[in-house]
Image: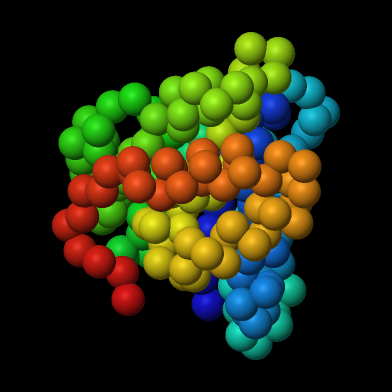
């Protein structure tokens, strides 16, 4: 079983990133479920998208034993973020700094400047970069749960008219993510 949490703010694309990951895993034949956890769904408000990959089909959502954490804004990094993390947990952060700036946060720290990539491709809504596909691409590389080509299929289905730009930002997220690893998860 794998448990992944995506922390974001309304409008950044945390829910969409989670749905892309869920769709990709499902098409790979995995038993998977996801659920957004948020309050008033207003732009800028915190939300968490919870993903569980479980071959047994158990429907309880993860709160402990987290294997991966995706953070769409560095101000969401709290002291308790990795409190319930398993050994080998990775934290993927959308930020301009390299992973060395967050050394010690988790066994594997990865960083990608998703805001810059989204802005360069015009993926901005109400002056907020939408980083869903950038972070989904970076997640694909960091998690090693499925090949990048599988993610592109999910993107084509979600964005039939804007698939190419979203695949390009996902590809940039995949290739530009920087990793700092103390150990590699199994």
Residue at 26%, 48% (x, y): give it.
179
145 vs 111: above or below: below
Look at the image and tell me whether residue 52 can be seen.
Answer: no
The residue at the far top in this view is 127
Extreme-right residue of the structure = 40
Question: From the viewer's perspective, is residue 27 above or below residue 14?
Answer: below
In screen coordinates, is 146 left or right of 87?
A: right
Q: x, y (%) of residue 45?
A: 69, 25
Q: Quadrant of residue 24?
A: bottom right
On the picture, is 178 further left or further right than 128? left
Q: Is 114 left or right of 6, judged from the image as shown?
A: left
Quarter the C terminus occupies: bottom left
- Which residue is rendered at x = 40% and y = 67% of the image? 144
Residues 98 and 83: in front is 98
* Residue 151 sits in quarter: bottom right
Where residue 13 sits in the image (x, y, percent)?
65, 36
Q: How is the image coloured?
A: rainbow
Choose top left, top right, bottom left or bottom right for residue 58. Answer: bottom right
Q: Return the residue nearer the eye: 1 or 173.
A: 173
User: Residue, x 26% and y 55% (percent of image)?
Assistant: 107
Instruction: Establish if 125 lies above or below 156.
Output: above
């Amino acid at each position: 079983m794998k448990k992944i949490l995506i922390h974001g703010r309304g409008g950044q694309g945390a829910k969409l990133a989670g749905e892309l990951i869920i769709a990709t895993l499902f098409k790979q034949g995995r038993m998977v479920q996801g659920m957004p956890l948020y309050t008033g769904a207003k732009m800028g408000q915190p939300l968490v998208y919870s993903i569980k990959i479980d071959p047994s089909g158990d429907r309880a959502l993860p709160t402990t034993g987290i294997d991966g954490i995706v953070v769409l804004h560095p101000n969401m990094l709290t002291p308790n973020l990795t409190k319930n993390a398993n050994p080998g947990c990775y934290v993927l952060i959308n930020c301009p700094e390299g992973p060395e700036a967050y050394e010690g946060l988790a066994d594997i720290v990865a960083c990608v400047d998703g805001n810059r990539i989204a802005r360069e491709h015009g993926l901005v809504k109400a002056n907020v970069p939408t980083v869903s596909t950038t972070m989904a691409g970076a997640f694909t590389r960091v998690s090693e749960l499925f090949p990048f080509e599988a993610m592109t299929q999910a993107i084509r289905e979600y964005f039939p008219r804007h698939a190419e730009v979203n695949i390009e930002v996902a590809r940039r997220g995949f290739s530009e993510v920087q990793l700092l690893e103390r150990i590699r998860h199994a």
